[in-house]
Amino acid sequence: MSYRTVVAAALTVAGVMGSLAVPALASDTTQVAFTGQVDSAVSLTGAQFRLQADATADQVDAVAEGAEVPALSLPSGSDTITTAGSTFTVKVDPADIPAEFIGPNGVVSFDLEIFDAKSNKYTWTTQSARLDGGAWKDPLTSAELNNAKARSATTSAPPSVTTHLDAATAAVASSFSPVQTRSEQCITTKGGYHDAMAQIGTGYPAAPGYGTTRGSAWLNHQSGSEITFGAGLSTNGTTWKASGSTSVATSKSVSFDWDPSTFWNQQYKVEVRYVTYTRSCGGILINKQVKATSETGVFKTGQPGTGTPPNWLSTSKCGFNYAAGTWSKTTGKAYSYGTGVDISSVIGIDLSTSRAYTSSSKLNYKMDKAHDSLCGDTDKPGLSGKVQQFYDRIEEEL
């Protein structure tokens, strides 16, 4: 069924429900799937939206290159997408999402198009949300994936996305016209793919200091663990910008534990498959997108030979005189890297990575008498996204 047909049916049903005085869907805060922000100078009052649940990795894999990709069109009227200045809130009834559009760990990815006729501005963005316990949660901040009881008990604000509006083409404006004909209706087709290396973590073992050897660090990344990868958008088919992100789970059959390493800047990397999509209306280009669909099972290590270690040494961000043993980070602020996905050779820019720390995706340091201090980049080690190890007696140097 086409997008236009689905929306028309949804509007008809909404009209009937309104005449029966059924309570508005928007009153249920558990149905907030995600929120967003566009350029602060643009008011979204009167803007038009197109919302859909995106195909899962299995659905995309089953589609041949050049064929239309499955998508679930969702209501996008003012009762489900509300605006306040340059911000928007998207509400989706979990009951409207069939099982085939729900990926591993309950993650659903949404695509949203925004067109503001007043400024003739347009954008597309994508955002993943976790469906859990009848509510939507941020994939990065919802609780430990391997503990369903703890995960369901955790309150988590819906995810949020920031996107930039560009000048709309005549084709975009026409596609949002209420007199759009069937021949002008919009579809998304699958293009080729590119496998890119993505940095999902870093380790900074301590320098020798007062000992004779450097400390050591390693990462565990087990099957089912999730990573959020940035998405790319082109409105002219050639120039790209970052816009939104999708969350991808590691294959159920693939895990990797890096060996402990003493290198001062250990970069932990996975390979991720990006697929290119073309959005068109009536055969005319609306946009092109690149989105991550799955990890390939390839793992690598980066060890840049230049530069110097970071220095996060601070009494407010460090812990000193740790006992000997293994320190593991399994909670706290997610790891993020704004240019973590090496895909600039394809689209001219690199994209972001974010990874939640869990018991199945954790950073480890070997602590001993010669390497007994840890510092976070923004807060104490357990609360920061990145952690650095320091050598014995470093506290005396503050």
Image: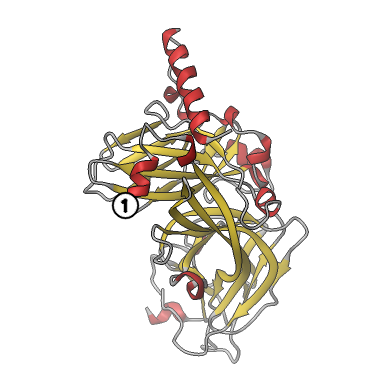
Q: Residue furthest top?
A: 20
> Which residue does the image show at 69% across and 48% down from the upper left?
146
Quadrant of the drawing holding the C terminus: bottom left
**Which residue type carries mark 1?**
Leu
Q: Considering the numbered disc 1 on the image, is that residue within a helix, a strand or a loop?
A: loop
Q: Is residue 248 above or below residue 20?
A: below
User: Seen in the image, is 153 located left or right of residue 124?
Assistant: right
State the image quarter where residue 221 is shown: bottom right
Task: Classify mark 1: residues with Cα within 10 Å, few (<14), some (14-19) or many (20+).
Answer: some
Quadrant of the drawing holding the N terminus: top right
State the image quarter where residue 147 is shown: top right
User: Seen in the image, is 79 located left or right of residue 296?
Assistant: left
User: Seen in the image, is 374 located left or right of residue 259?
Assistant: left
From the viewer's side, name the closer residue of 28 and 11.
11
For the question of whether residue 368 can be seen, the reply is no
Q: Position of residue 336 (x, y in %)?
A: 48, 63
> Which residue does the image show at 53% across and 77% down from the upper left?
204
From the viewer's side, name the closer residue of 138 and 168.
168
Residue highlighted by disc 1: 165
Marks counted in the figure total 1
From the viewer's side, name the closer residue of 241 and 270.
241
Q: Residue furthest bottom?
A: 212
> Which residue does the image show at 45% across and 80% down from the upper left?
394
Q: Is residue 239 above or below residue 24?
A: below
Q: Position of residue 42 (x, y in %)?
A: 24, 46
From the viewer's side, name the closer residue of 321 and 318.
318
Q: Position of residue 119 (x, y in %)?
A: 23, 46
Q: How is the image coloured?
A: secondary structure
For the question of whether residue 53 can be seen, the reply is yes
Q: Position of residue 296 (x, y in %)?
A: 69, 65
